[in-house]
C-alpha cells in the first residue's frame, strides 16, 4: 500500500495516497476548483498545466494550478466555491 | 538564482530527454527545464514511466550528468542567450549557448454545449488525472474526439477499472482503414495496434461520431453523441474528449522562430530560423514518441558539436515523418464539427466569451480587444486552436510573459542588468 497523506481542502481533512496531485485530492473531496466569470463551477480540463481551470489557493498562495502540485500532509487548499 | 549551460533544453518529454542525453554525451554542460513536477512529458507519466523505453532513456539521462530543473516554467527571454523562469514562485535566470525547444503538444479542444461542466476533460487530460490519483474504478467514461490517443486512453482507463460505454471517433471508418493498411508496412506499429486492440476489445468504437452536447447539473451526467448521423444519449460520470493534438509553439513564437503551417520550421539539423535555437518533437510535426526521440537526438548531437553523427539518424527521421503526415491525414477534422457550438456555448473558458459574441468579429485581434477572448490565464492556449478551426483566425504575435508570473518576477524585466555584464558574471549558482 502506498503511504497516505492528509491534505486540508476547504477546512476538512482529506486522506489520499502519496503521489496524488492536488487536483485529484480536490475531486476526491467532492469540490470543483474554481468559479467562472459567469458563476459556473469549473474543474480540471487539460490535466497538464495549460488551461488554468484547476487554479486554487494552496497554503495561502492564490492561482496555483492544482494539477501541477503534488499533495503534502498539512497542505491547506482552498477552492473558489 | 543564475545558472549557466552550454545547451539548455526546454521540455522534458521524449524529445527533450533524447536531446539532453546526446548533447551531454558530446561533453556539453546541459540543463533540462520542465514545467511539470517530474520529467517524462505527458507520455512517460505515472505508470507509463515504467515502460522499457522510458526506463532506458531516464537511465541514460541520469548517467549523463544533465541538470534537471523540474517544476520550472520559462516565461521570458530578455535577450538571446538568457531565459527567465519561475520555480516555486522564485525567479531563475538561465544562460545558454544553444537552446533546444522540445515544448511538446497539447490536446485540441473544440467547444460544444456543456463542455465547461466539471468532469468533461481532455482524453489525455483525464488520463493524466488518473495517473495523478483520481479514482476511476467503476466509473463510466465516454471517450470522444479524434486521434490515436483515444484508443490508448480508453485502454488505460479500462485497465484501471473504468467502464467505457463508447469511443466516438470523428474520422470515418474508411479513413481509419486506410490508416491501418498503411501501417502494415511498419511491424512496430502493428504490434502496438494489436496490443491496443486486445486492451480495448469489446468496447464499442463508433466512427464518424462526435459529441453534440454534455448534460448535467453540477457535473456531467450524460452526453449526446452524433453516431453516423443519429443522436444517441449515453449516461456517464466523465466525458474524456480531445480532438488530436496541437503543437506548443508559444515559446518558439516569442523567440522569433519561423512558423509554417502551424509548426516550427526547422532545417535538416533541427535548427530553427533563429541562430543557436533548435526545435525537436511535436512542435515541428505531430509524429509521436518515435519521431520525438529521433529529432531530439539529432538536435542534441548538432548542439553538442557532432553534426556528422546526427546525419546517421536522417533515415529514421524520414520514416517517422511519413507516419506524422499519415496521422495528419487520418485525423483531420471534418467540416461538420464547425457546427458544434451553439450561440451560447462558451469558447473562451477563462473569460466566459460565447460563440455568438465572437462570431461578430473579423479576426483574433479584434475579438480579443472587444471581448477579452484569449486574454485570461491560459492566454488563448485552449480557445486559440478552436477559433482557428471555427473562424480560420490566426493568433498574431506572442508577447512575454508567455505564462502568468508573479509581479515581483515580472519586475526584473525592467531591472535586468546589462546583457554583456550578465553573460560574464552570471554563471554558477
Image (tube, coloured by chain):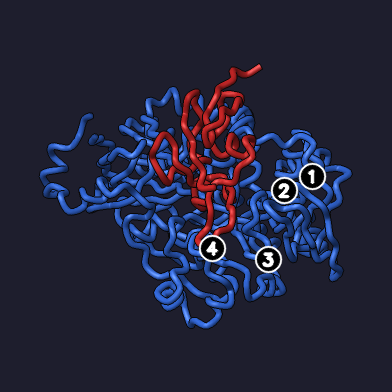
Chain colours: A red, B blue
**The quadrant where residue B392 appears:** bottom right
Kindly report the distance in space between the C-alpha atoms of the residues bearing marks 3 and 1.
20 Å
How many residues crowd mark 2 within 10 Å: few (<14), some (14–19), many (20+)?
many
Residue bearing the label numbered 1: B140
CA gap between label 1 and label 4 equals: 29 Å
Which chain letter goes with mark 4? A
- Of the numbered discs 3 and 2, the one sitting upstream in the chain is 3
Q: Is residue B379 above or below residue A81?
A: below
Q: Chain of mark 3?
A: B
Q: In the structure shown, which secondary structural element does the residue marked by tag 3 occupy? A: loop
> Pointer 1 and pointer 2: residues touching (CB < 8 Å)?
yes
State the residue at coordinates (45%, 73%): B371
Q: Which mark is residue B113?
A: 3
| Callout 3 and callout 1 share a chain | yes
Look at 84% across and 71% down and name the residue there.
B229
Q: Which residue is mark 2?
A: B238
Amino acid at each position: 500500500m502506498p503511504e497516505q497523506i492528509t491534505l486540508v481542502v476547504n477546512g476538512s481533512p482529506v486522506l489520499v495516497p502519496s503521489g496524488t496531485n492536488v487536483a485529484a485530492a480536490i475531486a476526491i473531496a467532492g469540490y470543483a476548483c474554481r468559479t467562472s466569470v459567469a458563476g459556473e463551477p469549473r474543474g480540471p480540463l487539460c490535466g497538464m498545466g495549460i488551461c488554468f481551470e484547476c487554479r486554487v489557493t494552496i497554503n495561502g498562495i492564490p492561482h496555483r494550478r492544482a494539477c501541477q502540485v503534488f499533495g503534502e500532509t498539512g497542505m491547506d487548499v482552498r477552492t473558489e466555491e | 538564482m543564475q545558472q549557466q549551460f552550454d545547451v539548455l533544453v526546454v521540455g522534458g518529454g521524449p524529445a527533450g530527454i533524447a536531446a539532453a542525453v546526446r548533447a551531454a554525451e558530446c561533453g556539453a554542460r546541459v540543463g533540462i527545464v520542465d514545467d511539470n513536477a517530474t520529467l517524462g512529458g505527458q507520455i512517460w507519466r505515472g505508470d507509463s514511466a515504467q515502460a522499457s523505453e522510458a526506463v532506458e532513456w531516464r537511465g541514460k539521462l541520469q548517467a549523463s550528468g544533465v541538470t534537471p530543473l523540474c517544476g520550472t516554467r520559462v516565461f521570458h527571454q530578455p535577450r538571446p542567450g538568457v531565459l527567465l523562469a519561475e520555480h516555486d514562485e522564485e525567479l531563475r535566470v538561465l544562460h545558454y549557448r544553444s537552446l533546444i525547444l522540445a515544448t511538446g503538444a497539447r490536446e485540441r479542444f473544440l467547444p460544444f454545449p456543456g463542455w465547461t461542466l466539471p468532469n468533461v476533460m481532455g482524453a489525455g487530460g483525464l488520463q493524466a488525472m488518473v495517473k495523478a490519483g483520481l479514482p476511476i474504478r467503476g466509473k463510466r467514461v465516454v471517450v470522444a474526439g479524434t486521434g490515436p490517443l483515444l484508443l490508448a486512453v480508453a485502454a488505460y482507463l479500462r485497465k484501471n477499472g473504468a467502464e467505457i460505454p463508447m469511443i466516438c471517433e470523428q474520422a470515418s471508418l474508411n479513413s481509419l482503414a486506410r490508416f491501418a493498411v498503411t501501417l502494415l508496412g511498419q511491424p512496430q506499429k502493428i504490434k502496438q495496434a494489436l496490443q491496443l486492440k486486445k486492451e480495448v476489445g469489446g468496447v464499442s468504437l463508433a466512427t464518424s461520431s462526435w459529441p453534440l452536447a454534455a448534460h448535467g447539473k453540477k457535473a456531467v451526467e450524460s452526453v449526446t453523441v452524433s453516431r453516423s448521423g443519429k443522436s444517441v444519449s449515453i449516461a456517464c460520470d466523465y466525458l474524456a474528449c480531445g480532438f488530436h493534438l496541437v503543437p506548443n509553439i508559444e515559446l518558439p513564437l516569442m523567440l522569433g522562430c519561423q512558423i509554417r503551417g502551424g509548426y516550427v520550421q526547422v532545417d535538416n539539423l533541427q535548427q530553427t530560423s533563429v541562430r543557436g535555437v533548435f526545435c525537436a518533437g511535436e512542435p515541428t510535426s505531430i509524429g509521436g514518441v518515435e519521431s520525438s526521440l529521433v529529432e531530439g537526438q539529432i538536435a542534441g548531437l548538432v548542439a553538442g558539436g557532432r553534426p556528422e553523427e546526427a546525419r546517421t539518424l536522417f533515415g529514421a527521421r524520414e520514416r517517422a515523418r511519413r507516419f506524422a503526415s499519415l496521422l495528419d491525414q487520418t485525423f483531420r477534422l471534418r467540416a461538420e464539427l464547425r457546427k458544434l457550438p451553439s450561440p451560447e456555448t462558451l469558447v473562451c473558458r477563462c473569460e466566459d466569451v460565447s460563440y455568438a459574441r465572437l462570431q461578430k468579429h473579423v479576426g483574433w485581434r479584434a475579438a480579443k480587444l472587444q471581448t477579452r477572448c484569449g486574454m485570461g490565464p491560459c492566454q488563448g492556449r485552449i480557445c486559440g486552436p478552436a477559433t482557428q478551426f471555427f473562424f480560420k483566425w490566426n493568433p498574431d504575435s506572442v508577447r512575454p510573459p508567455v505564462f502568468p508570473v508573479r509581479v515581483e518576477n515580472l519586475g526584473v524585466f525592467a531591472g535586468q542588468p546589462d546583457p554583456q555584464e550578465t553573460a560574464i558574471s552570471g554563471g554558477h549558482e
